[in-house]
Image (cartoon, helix red, strand yellow):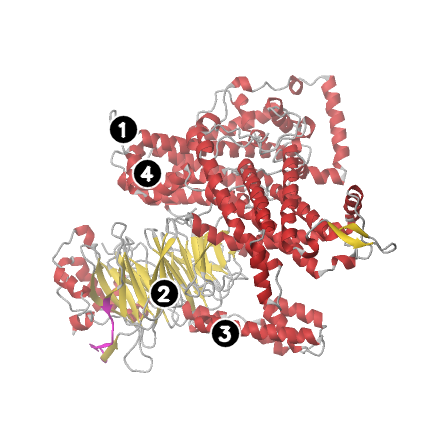
Amino acid sequence: MFPSPVHIYTDGSDAEDHVSSAFVIRHQKKRNIHHQTQLSLAANAIILAGVVCVWLQPCDLPSPQFTRDTLKGHSRPESSSRSAFLDQRDTLWMRSAGAWRDAGLYGLLDEITNSAEEVPRFLAVGSACVLALLRWASSFHGSLFPHLTLSSDEMVAEFSQMLDWSDSALRSFAWHPHTDKFAVALLDDSIRIYKSNSSATPTLKHRCQRSVCALQWKPLCGSALAVACQSCLLIWHVDPTSLSTRPSSGCAQVLSHPGHSPITSIAWSPTGSLLVSASPVDTGMMVWDVAAESAVPLQRVGGGGVTYLSWSPDGSRLLAATPSALFRVWETRMWTCERWPCLKGSCQSACWSPDGGCLLLSMQGERVIYALTFSDLTGGSKAASVVADLSETSFPGPDGDLTVGGEVCSLSWDPRGERLAVLLKGDSQAVNHPSVIAVFKTRSSPVFELLPCGFVMGEAGAEPRFMQFHPHFQHGALLTVCWSDGRISHVPFYFSSAGLLGGDSPQQALASNTADHSSNKLYTEQIS
Amino acid sequence: MFSLKQNSWFIRKVVIWRAVASIAWSVLLLPVTTAVFVLLSRFSLFHPIQWISDCTSLLAASSTIFSLVVLCGVVLITGFFNLEFYTLVPSIPCSRMALLGTVLHPRQCVHSLVYCTMGMLVMWCASVTIGGRYSTLGTTCRQSESGEVVTCLNEYHLFILLAGAFMGYSHSFLGVVQNMYYVSFQPIQQYKYPRFKGCLPMVVKCSVIQALYSARNFAAFYFFFGYAPKTWISSTLNLQIDSSLQPLDSLTGLLDLSLLYHLSISGTFLYLTWYLTVLLFRIYVTEFLALQDLALLSQHSLSRRLEVFSLSQPGGHAHNWNAISRECLSLLSELTQRLVAHQDAVASNGRVKSQSASSDTRSASSSSSVVSGTEDIAETPRLSVPLRTPGSVFKSSVGGANSALTAPFTPDVDSPFSSPAIRRLVGQQDPQSPCFGTVQSPHIMRRGPKPWSASTESQSSGSPPASPATVPSPPAASQKPSFLAQWLQNRREQVKSFLAKRVLIMYLFNKLPEASSQALFADSQAHIWALQGLSHLVAASFSEDQFGVVQTTLPNILSCLVVLLEAVDRHFKLPHASSKPVRTICSMGDSTYKTLRFLLRAVLKTTIYKITTTFGEHLNAVNISTEHRKRLQQFLEFKD
């Protein structure tokens, strides 16, 4: 069942060195093993000894590494380079036109107010008044929704799923849903596409491709890649049979809507017919008909914007998180929404179970995972329940005690619904408290279960920034992790599906354990 | 002329009631828009309390009530025109001459006239509401020399009324140019109220922008030609012209901020009334239709899918599935044939300028045999070919002005005067056409099968008639050129080359780029729904079809899809076919039809991908031809 041990690394890096970065602490829970097969034991063995992974590297998936030094960041914005030029006085008319073009109404009013000696007095006073009024209104608006005071880049960094976005060499990552290829957005605003069995890596560059925040391949299509940029949405059509390494910018469709930028999240419907985009400054999300380049705005008051979108795998629901303590779940047939106000903090990350019946959420600043269930018959749950508490705990590690736990930054569920990866933020000040990825085994029937499985950690100094499961890994699950040192690595979990074997072992005790709120210190209790 | 000629039960029982409901809502919305208009028109910054009290008293006044009654009449007529003129297949003029023909068509003239009148009525109501110097046509004034009091012409009132007529005409004109009456379908389904709420800002923005443009244009128009209506009115009604006031057809008279403000506010009110009626009509009429429902229910409803896959109780026939798949496949293969015929016409036109007709026919028939797998082609390809030319597709949308000018109206003629072969193919259609020799409006020949009624009616009217009797034999002259014919031919060529040198003629008759592609795919919404419905059903059949009813038609469906994909791919290789239209900034006219071909291509590929990913390797067991299998293999490997 295991593929033959192959080490083909297109970037030529040392295989062994690379994989040892994915060592894992330990896993000693025996109680849940009896419903697993021999293969899952093997999977545990892999997790225990990272070096073994070398021989079981799933296939010849490319694992590139990017460093900040090799990538030149994009040039400074024009406004900051203005000081390098000599000041030249234009006529008032020219300056006003320029200010209008560059900074809109604000710039125009500002320009008129600043050149009070050249304009009639009433105009200068009037524009100063209007400007003050506008500033007051926008500061009032900003006090309601603090994120609106951020600049465009800061906003992207704040709401990107890639942690520490502005500092990272990798800006975004996406697996193709059907084939072994992935796209990586880099610091220099280019996108590279890596394929297994192919050394050609097309590089996509476009004039409008700035500050890439999210990538997603179109389902049921071989070529289309949607890119969320600072000012617009780009749809690249990269011919999979082409050998070109620099597809021209004519291959990209530019979709934009006034007032809808920066775009921080995009989601294709699982049938590939619609694309939804969201911006933290726009209260409406856009439902794009990409081929027709037309959009239907879905406007809802409240929340101040939309930051994160996630479409359920069966296509029936769509999660839309806002920057405020509120998220919405849209049903996609008639496009009505349920409002879910949270107690504190906005929704940070979420993932759907493969059947679309269960939604796991993490809130900003909180160390728990919430679950929501949906059902067409009963309507689903009325309140989100806490399914796991991930507060700090210490474990004996190879070099002394290790503290694990913290804010839940990212969630990812494997397409079979058997492994859940949770990115836990560490404490950079404390020693031995790094960011780790905690992996859980999950089952959704007969009752939802969450069993700890192990941890994935990087090399010293490397912290996980982003993770995504391979959408169709044959032998279990394959977690791809982007590290802070610019490396992309693949961590396989070999198991055979419990659903296929009909593993109906009595798990009720454990299930009640995990579902019970009073004992929701999940792995604290079970491991220590 | 304005009676509903459609005998379809759907039009009678469903569409009319939906139109009535939309008109009722438009009428109910009238008081709201009127109140907003009153508030804005009497706006005064420095006396807010007086402003509010003035407005409330005005809203209860009898003149406002009377205005509301008049406005209700206007809305009713607008709603009636919406119902009468709406179309699902937009008319796409292929040359400027065709556009001119549409604008000057009698029916369109009546439409413009009615809209001019309605515009004047609305503006009259507006001027009465604004009051002050706008309220009446005649005012008392004192003659300068004698000092006696006479009735003078109130030019402000006249100005506003004429603006209404101008806006009414421009609305009617733009309605043709921008296909205002084309009803398109949103990519997502929404309830009526959220949809209305979502579209409302767009409609308000559109009406403001349109009103500003119209106000600017009208001011310019009045500056140059305002003198004529003024003197005419004053002489017929025996009204004096007050010489103490500044005339409005001068630069200083027009630079009156208050006048321009009131003009744009009233214009916005006028356009908003009409646009809201159009919007409500569109929202009501595009709800829950047959093919659309097939596409949606096949995706969302398990029980309905099971019904489709079930067998009839006595007999065990898969009637449901057979009916659905046959309907969808016939729609799709009709599109394939249309595309193939279009490509043949283009190819023959580009290759040889003047060739004998027979070789043309041969090439068409040889390539049309490609589609023989999907539908039985008449045994006599030569007879069936003319029916598949773009002319036959096009005949119903843009008729020929006359037989000599037919060629410019056909989609793909590089020069305004095409080769005789093409003209013959198209010209043959004309004698059969009921409107031979006249400019024919697209609205009269509204296509029989609408996307929503296609499932019930397209069998009878949608498929091309294949009976040889309707096809006239090719003119003998082109086969055995006599001396006279030769001479006529030469003279014609001379006239053509003479005319082709004139810039204006070229301008009017030159083919608009893209127009032919747009016209070919004008009714593709039905095809898109058919594709979506088929893909969902076939993909679901993999796990839900207990009796294997879908398996029997799977080879047919796959080959139909692949053939259509080939035809579409080849179409996109034609010049102008893959160029995207310029985005319109903000207009009420729907330009969705311009991109339908891209949408169709995307949906077609998604459909094939959905089927191949669902069935995977099992597709190798399906009995299809080798070339089709190769193509599907590309899809299996995600190489397309």
* Mark 2 residue element: strand
What residue would you read off at disc 3?
A139
Label 4, label 2: how far apart the Cα atoms are: 50 Å
Give the magenta-colored segment's residue range: A387-400
The stretch drawn in magenta includes residue A399? yes
Tell me if mark 1 has few (under 14), some (14-19) or many (20+) residues whose alpha carbon lies within 10 angstroms of its own: few
What residue would you read off at disc 1?
B312
Image-based side of B429 in relation to A269, left or right: right
Which amino acid, mark 3? Ser
What residue would you read off at disc 4?
B620
Which amino acid, mark 4? Asn
Image-based side of A460 in relation to A184, left or right: left
Label 4, label 1: how far apart the Cα atoms are: 30 Å
Residues at discs 4 and 1 in contact (Cβ within 8 Å): no
* Mark 4 residue element: helix
Tell me if mark 4 has few (under 14), some (14-19) or many (20+) residues whose alpha carbon lies within 10 angstroms of its own: few
In this rendering, the answer to whether B130 lies above or below A518 is above
B360, B557: nearer the viewer: B557
Q: Are marks 1 and 2 on the same chain?
A: no
Image-based side of B441 in relation to B297, left or right: right
What residue would you read off at disc 2?
A326
B616, B542: nearer the viewer: B542
Q: Quadrant of the C terminus of chain A?
A: bottom left
A60, B98: nearer the viewer: B98
Q: Are marks 4 and 1 on the same chain?
A: yes
